[in-house]
Image (cartoon, rainbow, N blue to C red):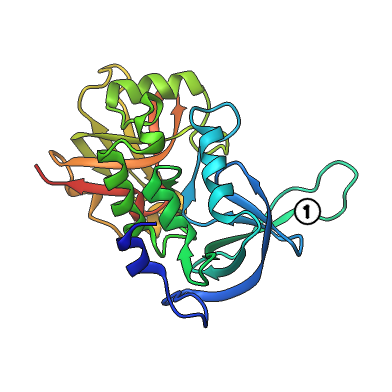
Amino acid sequence: MTIALLALTLVSACGPQIGDLEKGETGRVVRAFNGDALELDNGLVVFLAEIDAPARDQAYAAQAQAELEALALHREVQLAYGGARRWVGRPRAGEEAAPEAAIAHVYVKSEGGGWFWLQHELVSRGAAFTRPRRENFARSKELAVLEAQARASERGLWAQRAYRPLNARTASAAAREAAGSCTRGAAPYRIVEGRVSEARAFSNRAALTLEGGDEAAPFTIVVFGENYQAWSGPSLATLSGARVRARGPLGLFRNAPQLCLDHASQLEVLTD
C-alpha cells in the first residue's frame, strides 16, 4: 500500500473516515463477484458504487476479480452511501421476491487495524474504472483523477487495447458491433474522446457530433429526457469546437452510432 494511499485512507481504530457519506451496514466479505461486487456474511450483496470492472469473458476480468479478492475477501468492511442505496432486480422464475443488493462505497479494515477505501484502491490499480450515474456520483470526480493517473501509466486494464479511449471512428465501429440501444443494460460502456464539430440543444435533448465519424451517420454524444432536464454540467449548446471526453454506454439509434449520458459527471471538457 502506497504512502499516498495511507495518508488518504488510514484512520484511527474507531473506524473509517467517510466524510459526507452516510454510514451503512458492517460485515465480513465471504465472496467476490467479478471485480465490482461482494457478498457479506449476513447475506447482503454489495455493488461497489461509482465503479465498474471487466466481467465474464471480457479482457482483464479474471485479474480484476483477483484484485478484489486480494483486497477484501474475509475482511471486515464498513458500507457508506452517497446516493441511491439499493438496486432491485426482476423476480426470477418461481420467485415472488425480487433480488436486492446494496450500492455502496466500501471501506476495508486492513490487517494492521487501519481502514482503506476499496474503490480508491481498485481504480488506482487499474482493476476498475469510474462509472458515475445520475443517482450515484458523490465521489466520481476524485475517482476520475485516480483513473486518469492509472490510464496514463497503463496500469491494469488500461494496458489492454480493449479499454483505451476511442475516437469517433472506432466508437462508431464498437456501437455497430454491439448493435443495440445505448439504454440497454448490456450496452458496452466505453470512454470516447474527440472534438465537437457541432453542438445542438433542443427542448428535451442535446447532441454533440464528434469530428472524424462517418458523414452519412456521424457519431454523437447524446443526453435526453429526464437526464437532460436534470443536466448540471456545462451548457451543451456552447461546446462546438471543444475537445471532450465522455464515458457511457454505446448503441445505435436509427442506425446512427451514439454514446448516452445520464449525468454531467460523465462528460469532461478538455483543454488543448
* Position of 17 relative to 139 (above/below): below
Please state which of residues 118 and 54 is positioned toward the viewer in this rendering. 118
- 219 with respect to 61 (left or right): left
Q: Residue at x 35, y 26 (%)?
A: 171
Q: Is residue 97 above or below residue 85?
A: above
Q: Which residue is at a point 38% across and 52% down the rendered structure image?
A: 228
> Crowding near pointer 1: few (<14 within 10 Å), some, many (20+)?
few
Q: Position of residue 134 (x, y in %)?
A: 45, 57
Residue 169 sits above or below residue 101 on the image: above
Quarter of the figure with the N terminus: bottom left
Looking at the image, which residue is at 28% across and 17% down? Answer: 214
In the picture, the quarter occupied by the C terminus is top left
Judge whether residue 187 can be spotted in this image: no
Can residue 143 be seen at all in this image of the molecule? yes
Q: Which residue is mark 1?
A: 98
Could you tell me residue 198's position as x and y percent? 19, 35
Q: Position of residue 7 (x, y in %)?
A: 33, 69
Which of the two residues, 69 or 45, is positioned nearer the viewer here?
69
Q: Along the horizontal axis of the image, is 271 left or right of 39? A: left
> Looking at the rendering, which quadrant does residue 56 occupy?
top right
Name the residue furthest right: 94
Front one among 226 and 136:
136
Q: Quadrant of residue 142?
A: bottom left
Foreground residue, 270 or 15? 15
Residue 252, image x and y in percent? 45, 27
Q: Secondary structure at mark 1?
A: loop
Q: Is residue 122 above or below residue 199?
A: below
Q: Amino acid at mark 1?
A: Ala
